[in-house]
Image: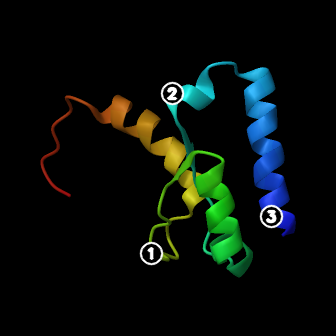
Amino acid sequence: MYYAGLIRKLREVIKNTRRGKLTQGMLLHHDNAPAHTSHFAMATVHDCGFELLSHPPYSPDLAPSDFHLFIHLKKSLRGRAFEDD
């Protein structure tokens, strides 16, 4: 119930600070903690209109917090050719 309340508060903050974003669709990414995957929390996410991104399988060498770095890495490597791995 606590997490569902946070999701509702998040929706209100987005509604008040980022006008128009909710109508464009919002993506939500959270981990697979039991509080996040409960039926009650999932129903709240759906009721608030968020689209849920699935959590990737566990990988010890890649944390979800590292994903934002890939965009910059791809831009810097674009167009470059390498002779070997």
Residue 10 in the image, given as x and y percentages of width and height: 78, 43
Q: Which residue is mark 2?
A: 24
User: From what the image shows, is residue 81 above or below residue 45?
Assistant: above
Question: Residue at 51% of width from left, 27% of height from top?
Answer: 24
Q: Which residue is mark 3?
A: 3
Residue 49 in the image, given as x and y percentages of width and height: 59, 45
State how far apart marks 2 and 1 are (Cα): 28 Å
Q: Which amino acid does the dot numbered 2 rest on?
A: Gln
Which residue extends farthest bottom? 34
Q: Quadrant of residue 12?
A: top right
Q: Which quarter of the image is occupied by the C terminus?
A: bottom left
Q: Is residue 14 left or right of residue 61?
A: right
Q: Which residue is mark 1?
A: 57
Residue 23 vs residue 84, the one in the foreground: 23
Which residue extends farthest left? 83
Q: Earlier in the sequence, mark 3 or mark 1?
A: 3
Q: Is residue 20 left or right of residue 24?
A: right
Q: Are marks 3 and 2 in contact (CB under 8 Å)?
A: no
Q: Which quarter of the image is occupied by the N terminus?
A: bottom right
Q: Which amino acid does the dot numbered 1 rest on?
A: Pro
Q: Quadrant of residue 63?
A: bottom right
Q: Residues within 10 Å of mark 3 (few under 14, many from 20)?
A: some
Residue 18 in the image, given as x and y percentages of width and height: 71, 22
User: From what the image shows, is residue 56 above or below residue 53?
Assistant: below
Total numbered labels: 3
Question: Residue at 56% of width from left, 59% of height from top?
Answer: 64
Q: Which amino acid does the dot numbered 3 rest on?
A: Tyr
State how far apart marks 3 and 1 are (Cα): 22 Å
State how far apart marks 3 and 2 are (Cα): 24 Å
Q: Secondary structure at mark 3?
A: helix
Q: Secondary structure at mark 2?
A: helix
